[in-house]
Image (spheres, rainbow, N blue to C red):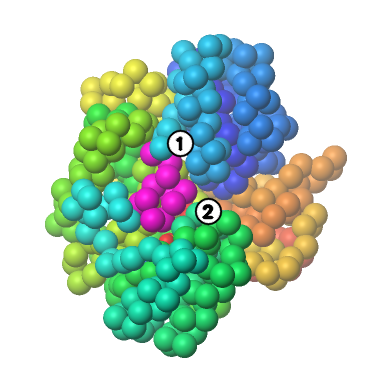
Amino acid sequence: MNLLLLGSGGREHALAWKIAQSPLLDMLYIAPGNAGTAACGANLDIDILDFEAVKKIVLEKNIDLVLVGPEEPLVRGIYDFFKTDKQLSDIPLVGPSKGAAALEGSKDFAKEFMIKNGIPTARYATFTKETVERGIAFLKTLAAPYVLKADGLAAGKGVVIPNTLAEAESTLREMLLEEKFGAASRKVVIEEFLHGIELSVFALTDGKSFHILPEAKDYKRIGENDTGNNTGGMGAVSPVPFADAAFLDKVKQRIIIPTIKGLKKEKLEYCGFIFVGLMNCDGEPKVIEYNVRMGDPETEVVMPRIKSDLVELLMAIAKKELGQTTLEIDERTAATVMLVSGGYPDKYEKGKVITGMENVSESIVFHAGTKREVNAVVSNGGRVLAVTSYGKTLKEAVANSYKSITHIDFEKKYFRRDIGKDVGA
Ligand code: AMP
Ligand code: GLY
């Protein structure tokens, strides 16, 4: 079969790496891809938000299945575009419908969905410019710190956590009255701050059955010991030591099952990955957010831990027969460390020549922001490479990645040296 994967980051390289191992695959295309995905298939340089351009490729290349990596095409309705197009309606696209993708595209929708379906989450209320004063009154009912979320997609930057009530009030006014995050903050969700430790759980579903994939913990801040600005993710580990069987069973019973049932009940068509961002509050899981895709860099540790054939699972999803498949997991730990451009997540330079990747033998080097130039691979984004390793223990997996990193270089390379440390590495 011929498969088209949409996206261009480390997540897509990890998915492409996994897909390319399948004996069921004839040809893998990645659009637009990066220098790493080019080793797993053929990159196609198109704009994936231009659905007509995606259609052209699907027909031209005789694509049998499309897998969508990032959220934006999903939130904009690529699933519905396929379903309602005469030439595409028989070609399965793995990803949720536009209605279901609102779980990520609208924080207000996601919160309402959780409350309706009895899924544990932080207490909240939603406000608009007309109700800003009520928002301020609501803030006064909460304890510091305060959590304010732009309702819409804001490239991962739409959450503000002020420490004082005064700051929270002025942030709320800026978000609602001055559209601090553009149209995304026309509505603002204010919620109770949850204390605990975060992790991510992923499910793969055909809308009827599901498999729970290995859980992961990512490291969002740029600085060691979780300091400094938020990033797209500086590293990840899987499994997560504190997520024991009892905790994961609570996640399944209280969150995953009610989520799938709720989607079905509300006739929100969903196939593909569901990413649940969770807080472990003294052993009780509460949902922080849904994403309608895999995480990045979580995918770079989750895919290496899946033993089953991903293409077989994707084909089963297309036929709504996921319940007839099994999921086999690698018991080893996987850890990934992100190499980023100096200055990221603020200003940084691209186009730096990357050397030494060929000398890495004990890790998998997933490309995030890279591009091939005539004689070299160069950096092409803030997050450049994710260096993933296996280990019998977390300590060993992390140590292997740090050893491999010593071989790789590019100007102003930066990485965190404490990935996994807080959970025992
Ligand atoms: P989100 O975009 O919803 O994932 O939020 C970004 C980050 O803000 C999360 O990864 C958490 O670290 C933090 N966060 C969001 N909501 C809460 C909350 N209710 N309590 C504590 N931290 C939160
Ligand atoms: N690593 C977090 C995300 O992919 O949203």
Q: Residue at x 65, y 24 (%)?
A: 52
Task: Say which element carries label 2.
Answer: loop
Magenta highlight range: 100-110
Q: Does 105 lie within the magenta span?
A: yes
Q: In terms of depth relative to the viewer, which is nearer, 369 or 52?
A: 52
Residue at 53% x, 62% y is 185
Q: Tell me which label, 2 or 1, sits earlier in the chain.
A: 1
Residue 348 horizontal/vertical position (percent): 74, 66
The residue at which mark 2 appears reads as 153
Task: Answer with the quarter of the image where residue 191 lies.
Answer: bottom left
- Measuring 32% from the left and 42% from the top, which residue is drawn there? 203
Residue 96 point in image, percent of width and height: 41, 34
Q: Is residue 359 above or below residue 225?
A: above
In the picture provided, is 61 more to the left or to the right than 19? right
The one of 222 and 78 positioned closer to us in this rendering: 78
- The amino acid type, in three-letter code, at marker 2 is Leu
Amino acid type, callout 1: Lys
Q: Residue at x 68, y 26 (%)?
A: 53
Q: Residues within 10 Å of mark 2 (few under 14, many from 20)?
A: many
Q: Is residue 149 above or below residue 309?
A: below
* Disc assigned to residue 98: 1
Q: Nearer the viewer, residue 363 or 67?
A: 67
In the depicted view, which residue is nearer to us: 300 or 72? 72
